[in-house]
Amino acid sequence: MFIKSHRQEFPVMSMCSVLAISKSGFYAWLKRELKPKTRDMASFDVRVKAVFEAHHGRYGSPRITRQLQAEGVTCSHTRVERSMKRQGLHAVVKKQFRCTTDSNHHLPVFDNILDRDFTTTAVNQKWVGDITYCATNEGWLYIATILDLHSRAVIGWAMDKHMKASLVCDALMMALFRTGFPQGVILHHDRGSQYCSHAYRNLIDLHQLTGSMSRRGNCWDNAVAESFFHTLKNELIHQRHFNNREQAKQEVFDYIETYYNRKRLHSTIDYRTPAEVQWCA
Protein backbone atom coordinates (compact mmCIF):
# COMPACT_ATOMS: atom_id res chain seq x y z
CA MET A 1 0.00 0.00 0.00
CA PHE A 2 1.12 3.56 -0.81
CA ILE A 3 0.78 4.81 2.79
CA LYS A 4 2.90 1.98 4.19
CA SER A 5 5.62 2.54 1.60
CA HIS A 6 5.86 6.31 2.22
CA ARG A 7 5.47 6.54 6.00
CA GLN A 8 9.02 7.80 6.35
CA GLU A 9 8.40 10.66 3.87
CA PHE A 10 4.92 11.97 4.73
CA PRO A 11 2.68 12.04 7.84
CA VAL A 12 0.27 9.09 7.95
CA MET A 13 -2.66 11.36 8.90
CA SER A 14 -2.10 13.61 5.87
CA MET A 15 -1.89 10.69 3.44
CA CYS A 16 -5.03 9.11 4.93
CA SER A 17 -6.87 12.41 4.50
CA VAL A 18 -5.79 12.84 0.86
CA LEU A 19 -6.66 9.22 0.01
CA ALA A 20 -9.95 9.30 1.97
CA ILE A 21 -8.87 6.47 4.29
CA SER A 22 -9.43 6.51 8.03
CA LYS A 23 -6.29 6.44 10.13
CA SER A 24 -7.72 3.69 12.35
CA GLY A 25 -8.59 1.64 9.27
CA PHE A 26 -5.01 1.91 7.98
CA TYR A 27 -3.50 0.74 11.28
CA ALA A 28 -5.99 -2.11 11.54
CA TRP A 29 -4.96 -3.27 8.06
CA LEU A 30 -1.26 -2.90 8.94
CA LYS A 31 -1.69 -5.01 12.06
CA ARG A 32 -3.41 -7.77 10.08
CA GLU A 33 -0.65 -7.76 7.47
CA LEU A 34 2.20 -7.93 9.97
CA LYS A 35 0.81 -10.76 12.08
CA PRO A 36 1.23 -13.55 9.48
CA LYS A 37 4.81 -12.39 8.80
CA THR A 38 5.58 -12.48 12.50
CA ARG A 39 4.11 -15.97 12.75
CA ASP A 40 6.05 -17.10 9.68
CA MET A 41 9.28 -15.71 11.13
CA ALA A 42 8.72 -17.50 14.43
CA SER A 43 7.87 -20.75 12.66
CA PHE A 44 10.97 -20.45 10.47
CA ASP A 45 13.16 -19.78 13.52
CA VAL A 46 11.86 -22.99 15.07
CA ARG A 47 12.84 -24.97 11.95
CA VAL A 48 16.30 -23.42 11.87
CA LYS A 49 16.91 -24.12 15.55
CA ALA A 50 15.69 -27.71 15.17
CA VAL A 51 18.29 -28.41 12.46
CA PHE A 52 20.98 -26.60 14.46
CA GLU A 53 20.29 -28.66 17.57
CA ALA A 54 19.89 -31.93 15.68
CA HIS A 55 23.47 -31.50 14.50
CA HIS A 56 24.73 -30.42 17.92
CA GLY A 57 25.73 -26.94 16.78
CA ARG A 58 28.00 -28.28 14.05
CA TYR A 59 26.04 -26.74 11.15
CA GLY A 60 26.46 -23.14 10.04
CA SER A 61 24.00 -21.29 7.79
CA PRO A 62 25.07 -22.92 4.46
CA ARG A 63 24.40 -26.48 5.66
CA ILE A 64 21.24 -25.53 7.53
CA THR A 65 19.99 -23.87 4.33
CA ARG A 66 20.62 -26.99 2.27
CA GLN A 67 19.05 -29.22 4.91
CA LEU A 68 15.88 -27.10 5.05
CA GLN A 69 15.68 -26.97 1.25
CA ALA A 70 15.93 -30.76 1.17
CA GLU A 71 12.96 -30.84 3.56
CA GLY A 72 10.93 -28.66 1.18
CA VAL A 73 11.39 -25.32 2.97
CA THR A 74 11.91 -22.37 0.62
CA CYS A 75 14.73 -20.29 2.06
CA SER A 76 18.01 -18.57 1.23
CA HIS A 77 21.36 -18.59 2.96
CA THR A 78 20.87 -14.97 4.08
CA ARG A 79 17.44 -15.71 5.56
CA VAL A 80 18.88 -18.59 7.59
CA GLU A 81 21.79 -16.38 8.63
CA ARG A 82 19.38 -13.70 9.92
CA SER A 83 17.39 -16.31 11.81
CA MET A 84 20.52 -17.67 13.48
CA LYS A 85 21.55 -14.15 14.44
CA ARG A 86 18.12 -13.44 15.96
CA GLN A 87 18.36 -16.59 18.05
CA GLY A 88 22.02 -16.24 19.00
CA LEU A 89 22.96 -19.53 17.31
CA HIS A 90 26.66 -19.92 16.49
CA ALA A 91 28.22 -22.98 14.86
CA VAL A 92 31.24 -24.64 16.44
CA VAL A 93 34.30 -22.47 15.82
CA LYS A 94 37.01 -24.19 13.81
CA LYS A 95 40.52 -24.23 15.17
CA GLN A 96 43.66 -24.28 13.06
CA PHE A 97 45.04 -27.76 12.52
CA ARG A 98 48.68 -28.70 12.58
CA CYS A 99 50.72 -31.47 11.00
CA THR A 100 51.73 -34.20 13.48
CA THR A 101 53.47 -36.68 11.18
CA ASP A 102 56.85 -38.05 12.19
CA SER A 103 58.66 -38.84 8.94
CA ASN A 104 62.13 -38.96 10.53
CA HIS A 105 62.99 -42.53 9.49
CA HIS A 106 64.93 -44.36 6.79
CA LEU A 107 62.21 -46.74 5.63
CA PRO A 108 61.32 -46.99 1.92
CA VAL A 109 58.63 -44.59 0.68
CA PHE A 110 56.29 -44.46 -2.31
CA ASP A 111 56.44 -41.69 -4.90
CA ASN A 112 53.81 -38.96 -4.71
CA ILE A 113 51.50 -40.48 -7.35
CA LEU A 114 48.45 -38.52 -6.15
CA ASP A 115 50.32 -35.21 -6.49
CA ARG A 116 47.44 -33.20 -4.94
CA ASP A 117 45.01 -34.29 -7.67
CA PHE A 118 41.97 -34.96 -5.52
CA THR A 119 39.56 -35.21 -8.47
CA THR A 120 37.71 -38.46 -9.22
CA THR A 121 34.92 -39.75 -11.43
CA ALA A 122 33.79 -42.69 -9.30
CA VAL A 123 34.30 -44.35 -5.93
CA ASN A 124 37.32 -46.58 -5.26
CA GLN A 125 39.68 -44.68 -7.54
CA LYS A 126 41.63 -42.78 -4.87
CA TRP A 127 41.82 -43.27 -1.11
CA VAL A 128 43.65 -41.22 1.51
CA GLY A 129 44.56 -42.11 5.07
CA ASP A 130 46.05 -40.60 8.19
CA ILE A 131 46.44 -40.98 11.97
CA THR A 132 45.35 -38.61 14.73
CA TYR A 133 44.98 -38.82 18.48
CA CYS A 134 42.45 -38.09 21.23
CA ALA A 135 43.26 -37.30 24.86
CA THR A 136 41.49 -39.22 27.65
CA ASN A 137 42.04 -39.47 31.41
CA GLU A 138 43.39 -42.94 30.73
CA GLY A 139 45.92 -41.78 28.11
CA TRP A 140 46.02 -41.22 24.35
CA LEU A 141 43.66 -42.94 21.94
CA TYR A 142 45.05 -43.15 18.40
CA ILE A 143 42.69 -43.14 15.40
CA ALA A 144 43.57 -44.27 11.88
CA THR A 145 41.17 -43.71 8.96
CA ILE A 146 40.85 -44.34 5.22
CA LEU A 147 38.64 -41.98 3.16
CA ASP A 148 37.37 -42.37 -0.40
CA LEU A 149 38.10 -39.12 -2.28
CA HIS A 150 35.01 -39.39 -4.47
CA SER A 151 32.44 -39.82 -1.70
CA ARG A 152 34.50 -38.42 1.21
CA ALA A 153 33.18 -41.40 3.21
CA VAL A 154 35.29 -42.90 5.99
CA ILE A 155 35.44 -46.42 4.59
CA GLY A 156 37.98 -47.81 7.05
CA TRP A 157 39.03 -46.94 10.59
CA ALA A 158 40.78 -48.41 13.62
CA MET A 159 41.41 -47.17 17.18
CA ASP A 160 43.87 -48.30 19.84
CA LYS A 161 46.13 -47.12 22.66
CA HIS A 162 49.16 -47.43 20.37
CA MET A 163 50.08 -46.23 16.89
CA LYS A 164 51.95 -49.28 15.65
CA ALA A 165 51.71 -50.63 12.12
CA SER A 166 48.84 -52.94 13.10
CA LEU A 167 46.63 -49.87 13.67
CA VAL A 168 46.86 -48.69 10.05
CA CYS A 169 46.72 -52.27 8.75
CA ASP A 170 43.40 -52.79 10.54
CA ALA A 171 41.98 -49.57 9.03
CA LEU A 172 43.05 -50.63 5.54
CA MET A 173 41.58 -54.12 5.90
CA MET A 174 38.24 -52.63 6.94
CA ALA A 175 38.29 -50.35 3.89
CA LEU A 176 39.07 -53.26 1.57
CA PHE A 177 36.38 -55.48 3.08
CA ARG A 178 33.66 -52.80 2.95
CA THR A 179 34.37 -51.90 -0.68
CA GLY A 180 34.71 -55.44 -2.04
CA PHE A 181 38.52 -55.50 -2.37
CA PRO A 182 38.90 -53.24 -5.43
CA GLN A 183 42.22 -53.30 -7.27
CA GLY A 184 44.28 -50.46 -8.71
CA VAL A 185 43.15 -47.88 -6.15
CA ILE A 186 45.66 -45.09 -5.50
CA LEU A 187 46.22 -45.18 -1.73
CA HIS A 188 47.84 -41.99 -0.44
CA HIS A 189 49.38 -41.31 2.97
CA ASP A 190 52.02 -39.14 4.53
CA ARG A 191 55.45 -40.59 5.28
CA GLY A 192 54.65 -41.84 8.78
CA SER A 193 56.66 -44.90 9.74
CA GLN A 194 53.49 -47.01 10.11
CA TYR A 195 52.68 -46.54 6.42
CA CYS A 196 56.25 -47.39 5.41
CA SER A 197 56.28 -50.57 7.48
CA HIS A 198 56.81 -53.98 5.93
CA ALA A 199 53.36 -55.18 7.06
CA TYR A 200 51.52 -52.25 5.49
CA ARG A 201 53.44 -52.34 2.23
CA ASN A 202 52.72 -56.07 1.99
CA LEU A 203 48.98 -55.39 2.21
CA ILE A 204 49.25 -52.82 -0.58
CA ASP A 205 51.10 -55.30 -2.80
CA LEU A 206 48.86 -58.24 -1.90
CA HIS A 207 45.66 -56.39 -2.84
CA GLN A 208 47.17 -54.70 -5.91
CA LEU A 209 46.80 -51.12 -4.73
CA THR A 210 49.00 -48.23 -5.88
CA GLY A 211 50.88 -46.67 -3.00
CA SER A 212 51.46 -42.90 -2.90
CA MET A 213 53.07 -40.68 -0.27
CA SER A 214 53.32 -36.97 0.47
CA ARG A 215 56.55 -35.06 0.19
CA ARG A 216 58.52 -34.77 3.39
CA GLY A 217 56.97 -32.31 5.84
CA ASN A 218 54.20 -31.28 3.42
CA CYS A 219 50.83 -32.01 5.04
CA TRP A 220 48.97 -30.21 2.22
CA ASP A 221 49.74 -33.17 -0.07
CA ASN A 222 47.31 -35.09 2.14
CA ALA A 223 44.92 -32.18 2.71
CA VAL A 224 41.65 -34.17 2.51
CA ALA A 225 42.68 -36.61 5.25
CA GLU A 226 43.94 -33.70 7.36
CA SER A 227 40.66 -31.85 6.75
CA PHE A 228 38.59 -34.78 8.02
CA PHE A 229 40.56 -34.91 11.27
CA HIS A 230 40.22 -31.13 11.53
CA THR A 231 36.43 -31.61 11.35
CA LEU A 232 36.43 -34.56 13.75
CA LYS A 233 38.37 -32.61 16.36
CA ASN A 234 36.32 -29.42 16.06
CA GLU A 235 32.93 -31.12 16.01
CA LEU A 236 33.59 -33.86 18.57
CA ILE A 237 36.95 -34.20 20.30
CA HIS A 238 37.39 -30.55 21.30
CA GLN A 239 33.79 -30.47 22.58
CA ARG A 240 34.12 -33.47 24.92
CA HIS A 241 36.03 -34.66 27.98
CA PHE A 242 36.71 -38.40 27.87
CA ASN A 243 37.15 -40.34 31.10
CA ASN A 244 38.71 -43.34 29.37
CA ARG A 245 39.58 -44.78 25.98
CA GLU A 246 36.43 -46.89 25.79
CA GLN A 247 34.22 -43.81 26.09
CA ALA A 248 36.26 -42.02 23.43
CA LYS A 249 36.10 -45.06 21.12
CA GLN A 250 32.31 -45.21 21.39
CA GLU A 251 31.84 -41.51 20.69
CA VAL A 252 34.28 -41.49 17.77
CA PHE A 253 32.54 -44.57 16.34
CA ASP A 254 29.13 -42.88 16.67
CA TYR A 255 30.46 -39.71 15.05
CA ILE A 256 32.00 -41.50 12.06
CA GLU A 257 29.40 -44.17 11.32
CA THR A 258 26.16 -42.64 12.59
CA TYR A 259 26.75 -38.96 11.97
CA TYR A 260 29.56 -38.10 9.55
CA ASN A 261 29.01 -40.85 6.98
CA ARG A 262 25.20 -40.91 7.09
CA LYS A 263 23.85 -37.54 8.26
CA ARG A 264 26.37 -34.74 7.78
CA LEU A 265 25.97 -32.87 4.48
CA HIS A 266 29.33 -32.43 2.74
CA SER A 267 29.90 -29.28 0.66
CA THR A 268 32.41 -30.97 -1.69
CA ILE A 269 29.81 -33.49 -2.87
CA ASP A 270 27.01 -30.95 -3.39
CA TYR A 271 25.70 -31.14 0.15
CA ARG A 272 24.94 -34.85 0.06
CA THR A 273 26.04 -37.33 2.70
CA PRO A 274 29.13 -39.50 2.04
CA ALA A 275 27.01 -42.64 2.38
CA GLU A 276 24.69 -41.45 -0.42
CA VAL A 277 27.64 -41.24 -2.79
CA GLN A 278 29.65 -44.24 -1.57
CA TRP A 279 26.98 -46.87 -1.12
CA CYS A 280 23.74 -45.50 -2.62
CA ALA A 281 24.90 -44.34 -6.05
Image (cartoon, rainbow, N blue to C red):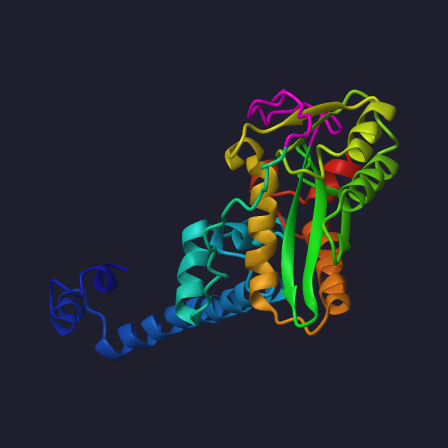
Q: Position of residue 66 (x, y in %)?
A: 56, 49
Residue 52 pos. (x, y %)? 56, 63
Residue 141 appears left or right of 8? right
Q: Is residue 100 magenta?
A: no
* Among the 4 quarters of the image, the one containing residue 50: bottom right
Query: Residue extending furthest bottom?
Result: 24
Relative vertical location of residue 274 with respect to residue 11 in this rendering, above or below: above
Residue 121 sits inside the magenta stretch: yes
Residue found 62% across the figure and 23% down from its top:
114
Front residue (pair 223, 140): 140
Looking at the image, residue 166 lies above or below residue 53: above
Q: Position of residue 159 (x, y in %)?
A: 76, 54
Task: Indicate the quadrant containing the C terminus: top left, top right, bottom left or bottom right.
Answer: top right
Please identify the quadrant where the N terminus is shown: bottom left
Q: Nearer the viewer, residue 236 or 89?
A: 236
Q: Left of 58 or right of it: where is 11?
A: left
Viewer-closest of 213 and 119: 213
Report the magenta residues as a range. Answer: 106-127
Classify residue 154 by image quadrant: top right
Residue at the location (74% across, 60% down)? 254
In this rendering, the answer to whether 187 lies above or below 81 is above
- Asked whether the viewer can see residue 69, the reply is no
x and y percentages locating residue 237 in the rendered image: 61, 62
Is residue 93 depicted above or below 132 in this figure?
below
Residue 175 visible, this angle: yes
Total marks in image? 0
Main SS category, magenta section: loop
Instruction: Determine the image quadrant of residue 149.
Output: top right
